Amino acid sequence: MIKTLTLTRPDDWHLHVRDGAALSTVVPHSAAQFGRAIIMPNLRPPVTTTAQALAYKARILAAVPHGAAFEPLMTLYLTDRLPPDEIARAREAGIVAVKLYPAGATTNSDAGVTELRKTYPTLEAMQRLGVPLLVHGEVTAPEIDLFDREAVFIDTQLIPLRRDFPELKIVFEHITTREAAHYVAEADRFTAATLTAHHLLYNRNAIFTGGIRPHYYCLPVLKRESHRQALLAAAVSGNPRFFLGTDSAPHPVHLKEHASGCAGCYTAFSAMELYAQAFDGMDALDKLEAFASFFGADFYGLPRNTGTLTLKRETWTVPEHFAFGEAELKPLGAGETLGWRVI
Ligand code: DOR
Ligand code: ZN
C-alpha cells in the first residue's frame, strides 16, 4: 500500500477567493497546496476590466504568506457588453481567460450574459488571440429542472457555440454529469473540463442525509451516483483534457445556514487530501499527478511547476471552522476524518 505520494506541485484551475478580509483566510490555504490558481471574477461588482483584474491580483498577492510562492492567474467576467478591444489589453497584461456566467446561474451572476449572441464580437477576439473561455455550463430558464440544467446547456448553448467558434479554447467548468463528461471526452483539443473534489466524492444524497445539509449545496448541484461514477472515470482516464479545478467557494457560515443558503463548498483547506481520497478510492493514485499538476498547465500553454507537494497516508480531522473576517467559514467535511494529509 502506498504510504506517501510526492507530486509535482499542483495548480487549481478554478478558485474563488473573494476580496477584503476574506483573502487573509483563504489565500494562505490555497498557497499551502498549489503553485497557481485561476481566480474567478464574480466579485461585486464583477471584474470586467484589465485594470480591475490587476488591482485584484495585487490584493491577493498581499495575502500570500511570506515564503510561499503562489501565483494568482486572473480572469475577466464576460458581460453582454465586454468590449472586444479589452481582450487584447487583457492578454497583454497576462490575464489568462474570460469567464462566462449565464445571467442568474449562480453567485454574483446578475451581470452575466443574457444571450450568447451578444458576446460574439468579443468571443471572435478571444478565438483570434487564443484567450480561453471558461464556462459555467447551466441554463437558467425556470421551467428547466434544476438537475437537468447542465445537460440542456450542452444541447442548446455549447454545441452551437462550438460550431460558431471551432477554435475557441473552452473549459467546461466543474462538470457534474455523464453528459458533460461524454461531451468533453468526444471533443477535440480545444475543449477541456475541470472536475471538483466534491463532485468526485459526493452524490446528491449528501445534501439531504439526516436533514438538509447546506454545506453540500453548490452549483451546479450534486447529481445522482451514476453521474459521479462517470466523473470519476473521466478523472482517472488519463485524458489530458480533464484536470483539477476545486471551485472552492467560501461563504460565511450564517449565509450557508440560511433560509436561502448560498451555493458553494469551501474545499481549499484540504483540496489535495480530498482529491487523493477520490483517486485512492478508484485505485488510481498513479493518475493523480498528471490530473493535478500537468494537464491544466498544458491546456493553458503554461509551463508545468517545478516544486513538489507530498501527501502522507494518515488520518486526521478536518477543522470545524476558520475565522472569516467578522464571520466564520466552515470547510467541507468539517469534523470528518480524511485518510490523506499534505505534509
Ligand atoms: O457553488 C458555486 N459557488 N458555484 C458557482 O458557480 C459559484 C460559486 C460561488 O462563487 O460561490
Ligand atoms: Zn466557480
Image (tube, grey):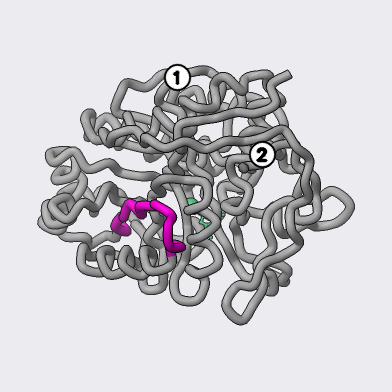
Point out the image quarter for the N terminus.
top right
Residue lying at 45% horizontally and 76% vertically, measured from the top left? 20
Q: Residue 60: where, in percent of width, then height? A: 39, 65
Q: Name which of mark 2 and mark 1 comes first in the sequence.
A: 2
Q: CA distance from mark 2 to mark 1?
A: 22 Å
Mark closer to the observer (2, 1): 1
Q: Which mark is residue 180?
A: none
Image vertical order of residue 65 relative to residue 181, above or below: below
- Looking at the rendering, the stretch of residues picked out in magenta corresponds to 64-77
**Amino acid at dot 2:** Lys
Whether residue 109 is visible to the viewer of this picture, yes or no, is no
Residue lying at 57% horizontally and 36% vertically, measured from the top left? 310
Q: Residue 16: where, in percent of width, then height? A: 47, 58
Q: Residue 100: where, in percent of width, then height? A: 35, 51
Say whether residue 71 is magenta.
yes
Q: Nearer the viewer, residue 157 or 340?
A: 340
Image-based side of 335 in relation to 326, left or right: right
Task: Identify the secondary structure beneath mark 2.
Answer: loop
Q: Which mark is residue 239?
A: 1
Q: Which mark is residue 223?
A: 2
> Residue 330 is drawn in which quadrant?
bottom right
Label 2 CB-ligand 1 distance < 8 A? no
Point out the image quarter for the C terminus.
top right
> Residue 93 is drawn in which quadrant?
bottom left
**Amino acid at dot 1:** Asn
Residue lying at 75% horizontally and 56% vertically, measured from the top left? 334
